[in-house]
Image: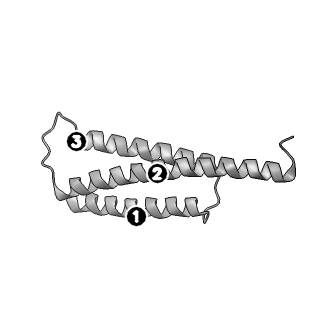
Amino acid sequence: MSSIVERTFDVTIIILHVAYVAVVVGLLDRKPEYLINVDFWLKVFMAVFLIVRFNPFTSVKFTEFDRKVVFGTGLFLFTVTIVNNYLQTYIESLKKNIRTVFGADK
């Protein structure tokens, strides 16, 4: 059972990273609102997973898988936060430049 959970976690993380990179790079043409929704639900999912897995009412022995989950979640949250802030700034700057070029800011 444990190996199924670990395999599912590994595959899910790989799929999420590939999809997120595809959205950021522009391979998947989506609106910024889509990225905000994905970001929100991923953070909620990760928070619930960590709360359930490491709640103080159970005694859990910290395993190598737990170490991987915590590190992966922390790294993903850090990366998503930084990338989203950069993208929002970049998109707003791009919109402003387009308005300026086409004279729509008058």
Taking 57 as reference, is 90 above or below it? below
Q: Which residue is mark 3?
A: 54
Instruction: Determine the CA span between mark 2 and mark 1.
Output: 14 Å
Q: Which residue is mark 2?
A: 80
* Image quarter hosting the N terminus: bottom left
Residue lying at the far top in this picture: please name it.
57
* Residue type at tag 1: Ile
In the picture, the disc for residue 102 is none
Name the residue: 63% across, 52% down. Answer: 90
At mark 2, the secondary structure is helix
Q: Is 60 situated left or right of 8 in this image?
A: left
Q: Is 5 situated left or right of 81 in this image?
A: left
At mark 3, the secondary structure is loop
Classify mark 2: residues with Cα within 10 Å, few (<14), some (14-19) or many (20+). Answer: some
In the picture, the disc for residue 14 is 1
Cβ–Cβ below 8 Å for labels 2 and 1? Answer: no
Percent position (x, y) of residue 36?
55, 45
